[in-house]
Image: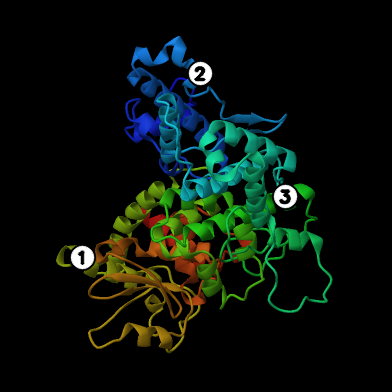
Amino acid sequence: MDTLDEITTATLKDANIGEDILPSLSRDDIKDLFPGPQNFLRRRALWLVVNKQEEETHAEKVPPSTTRASDLSQEEPNTSKFVTISNPEYIVFTDSELEQARRYYFEQKRLGTDHVEPLSKDLFCRLIRNTMTNMISIARATEDFRYPSKHEVNAMAKRLVEYYPMITGRCGEWEHVAKKLMKRLSNVKSPRKAKGPPSKKPRQDGDADAATTDYDGDSSGSTIILSPVRASTPVEQQGSSDEASPSTDFYSSQKTQARHYKTLQQLYKTKKPNKAAVTQLMDLEFQSRRLFIDSDAVKEQDRPTKILEAYPCFREVDHVLDELRRIIQPSNSRYISEMKERWENFYSKVQFYGVMKKLVKPPNTLNGVEHATAVFRALPQLFPSSTVPPKKLGASSEALFHVLTTSEDPDCFLRQRPLSCPFVLVSEDNCMIAVGSTPVTTFDREDLYEGLLYVMAYYYALHLTYPKCISTLLSVLQTEILQDSIHDRDSTPSYKKALAEWKSFIE
């Protein structure tokens, strides 16, 4: 393990994986520990260490009598797994089943067995498929959109026949293996044909390349690459931005992020996507995602539906809070915990502020949920806006949350709601975050007091405008809790007055 870097060693230590467990790691185990294309070289180094330790363990178990000079001609040859053709260096794919089949072949050959079973069809197909996938990944790690050449494929086929000689019993010489590898490569490279007639509209090279970026897996997802747009806070919807001339580096970066988006879509086709892998891909694809969300490509009333379709991970509170951190303080890994600490401090003080204003009863007579609802009802009055809420809405607090009565149907209530902003719907069983008439996610009633943090996170993640009837309150939360500044033009007189009174109270 001395050859591994610090990050790999620390990750293995956190997972309680020692040198005794290391040889038992499979490729899937290593991918779970180090997901993402940026960890490819780290996974490769760890796989080499695993194979080295496995070979050393196997060598210890072989009795000395098997290494006599008379048997050397029948021993397993020392065939290297690496295929070096100037640049890059490819590696022969192997796993526990293939290695077991290989050891069995050489054991039978050593014992002098006349008939040795060839490699099974399933293992041969797996070998061809994963070998080509690895070759494409290594080629792209050295240069974007590069595929292995025919010369490199032929060299790999020869090395496969040397490393797995039992292949020859099934398919003959290396030429057949090379044909199978080239067929697999052509299947990956071949674009899908359009079902309809070809469009007569002239093709835009930059946009078309960005929208049809190649990727190793099959995916129907794609990402929209837009011109650079200045990212803004939810209250800065109408601000103008200077158009920038996209450079080659910019489009190269966007194409890379498009591949990350496709990988993200593949993850959400599984039943339980790996949370760490999703977070990592969301970090890598952040720039392209915000350019799409913050632009005017989609109308605001349609934006939540379109974004949730494109990014189903936003239906989970943890991923939305991570997006909030990326937008406001991307380099601060402790931002979420610090924000929650600021909220708890604000929440405890605003109770007494409400009692002083005679808008909240003393909290000692209420339970947690009742206390949270009482504070939420008072907040729009403690930090009032100059605009009254819509008549169908009733009180301003209904723009933040609503407590369902026993006779109210949630679906019916959402369809009749006059505002399309994010809010919390409280029922007897749990709490729900909804955006307009669209249910998004649920959380426990005991966490209701954090509900406004989730609401603020959705305003940022979906890039929505604050409703005017609660804009003062949300602006105060933006500056005091989220620690995100407000542009001078958005600093209204009601916001300045409410903030000044609050500052005077806490001091």
Dots 2, 3 in contact, CB < 8 A: no
User: What amino acid is found at the position of numbered circle 1 in the picture?
Assistant: Pro
| Residue at the spot of label 2 | 73
Image height check: is 280 above or below 422? above
- Residue 190 appears at what percent x and percent y? 69, 59
- Residue 277 appears at what percent x and percent y? 47, 49
Dots 1, 2 in contact, CB < 8 A: no
From this viewpoint, which residue is outermost toward the front? 114
User: What amino acid is found at the position of numbered circle 2 in the picture?
Assistant: Ser
| Residue at the spot of label 1 | 362
Q: CA distance from mark 1 to mark 3?
A: 59 Å
Q: Say whether residue 251 is left or right of residue 387.
A: right
Please report the residue visible at 66 percent of the width from the left and 66 percent of the height from the top. Answer: 295
User: What amino acid is found at the position of numbered circle 3 in the picture?
Assistant: Ser
Q: Nearer the viewer, mark 1 or mark 3?
A: 3
Image height check: is 5 above or below 242? above
| Quadrant where the image shows the N terminus | top left
Indicate which disc, 1 or 2, sits on the residue closer to the N terminus: 2
Q: Say whether residue 102 is left or right of residue 363.
A: right
| Residue at the spot of label 3 | 252
Q: Nearer the viewer, mark 1 or mark 2?
A: 2
From this viewpoint, which residue is outermost toward the top? 69
